[in-house]
Image (spheres, helix red, strand yellow):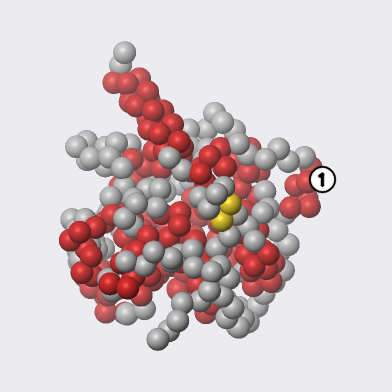
Amino acid sequence: MTISQEQNVEMKQKMDMLLASDADLQQEETPVAVNDNDAKATQPTQQQHPTTTRHPFQFIPLSMGGGGRSHVPSPGSRYLMEHEVTLEDLQTVTDKFYELAFQDKTLDKFIRSHNDPHGSRFAKWIHQKLSGSHVWDQDRAARGRGCPVHDRSSAHVAAWYSPKRPASERGEHFQLEDCRTWMRLHFWALRESGVMEKSPSFADYYVRFIAHFVRVYESTAPPFARDALRWSADPKNIEEYIRNGRKMKDVLGLNAYTAADQIPEDELYDREWPYNMEEPSSS
């Protein structure tokens, strides 16, 4: 057996383990069969919400299925997709995120190629998760199962084995520092896109949405999501990050124990968020 064959077996084993560990991944494993009529019915309506539109804030809780283990669309999340944020808005965010990630010294090592339509695929996944559309399933069907990266499990295992990573790290799972860097850049992109200002309800929902989904990659990461959002609100943080060669030096090398002092205790030990059913008190 060649080394590449051994690695393929190892990657398949890790995909199976990742899939077995997470209800959301299991729900996504089998794309919904969509015929032409269904596809037309579930295509996002590309209503043009002018960028000058500012929607009032409303708190929308995450909707959980599968015994509370998997995210499902709700009337509230569907409302956001139908009336406040378009698929084009989402891709503005995700394209901006990948522009930042390609330059980041930590994240770019996980990205095999800059030529793949990363932003488009990510935006479609978000839209499907919040609206119940099938745009991501349709995209996956067009790629086919023969494509090495055909879902989240295969995408993330491929990232772990990226040839751009040092050989000593290749195959290792995401660490807390990777997840914190990812969330900081992603929420920076959300802020820069104008979507946060356009729909504060979506932004609030989305931070909790990401906190839920990041858990499967690093179980200690969710409490750091709100801190990741705050990071890009201070221009000094961004200036320092760029000055440091696009490295998040304040998070690199820290585990959950050593990073705990960097976030408020009420966030570190919050056992309700991001699944709280009411807006947290500001007091």
Classed neighbour count for the residue bearing mark 1: other residues with Cα under 10 Å, few (<14), some (14–19), many (≥20)? few
Q: Residue shown at 43%/66% (left/top)?
A: 273
Residue 147: image x %, image y %?
52, 33
* Image-based side of 190 in relation to 263, left or right: right
Secondary structure at badge 1 equals helix
Where residue 41 appears, x then y in whole percent?
A: 78, 52
Residue 257 % position (x, y): 20, 59
Q: Nearer the viewer, residue 15 or 106?
A: 15
* Count of numbered labels shown in the rendering: 1
Q: Quadrant of the N terminus?
A: top left
Q: Is residue 209 placed above or below 51 in the rendered structure?
A: above
Residue extending farthest right:
37
State the image coordinates of residue 4 (x, y, percent, origin top left).
33, 23
Q: Is residue 243 left or right of residue 111?
A: left
Residue 96 visible somewhere in the drawing:
no
Amino acid tagged 1: Asn
Q: Residue furthest bottom?
A: 283
The residue at the point 55 percent across, 49 percent down is 67
Q: Residue at x 45, y 81 (%)?
A: 281
Relative to 245, 204 lies left or right: right
Q: Which of the 4 image quarters holds residue 17? A: top left
Q: Nearer the viewer, residue 257 or 160?
A: 257
Q: Please tell me which residue is depicted at 59% across the width and 33% down the height of the picture.
A: 144
- Residue at label 1? 37
Corner quadrant of residue 138: top right
Which quadrant is the C terminus positioned in? Answer: bottom left
Q: Which image quadrant is residue 232 in?
A: bottom left
Would you say residue 159 is visible in this rendering?
A: yes
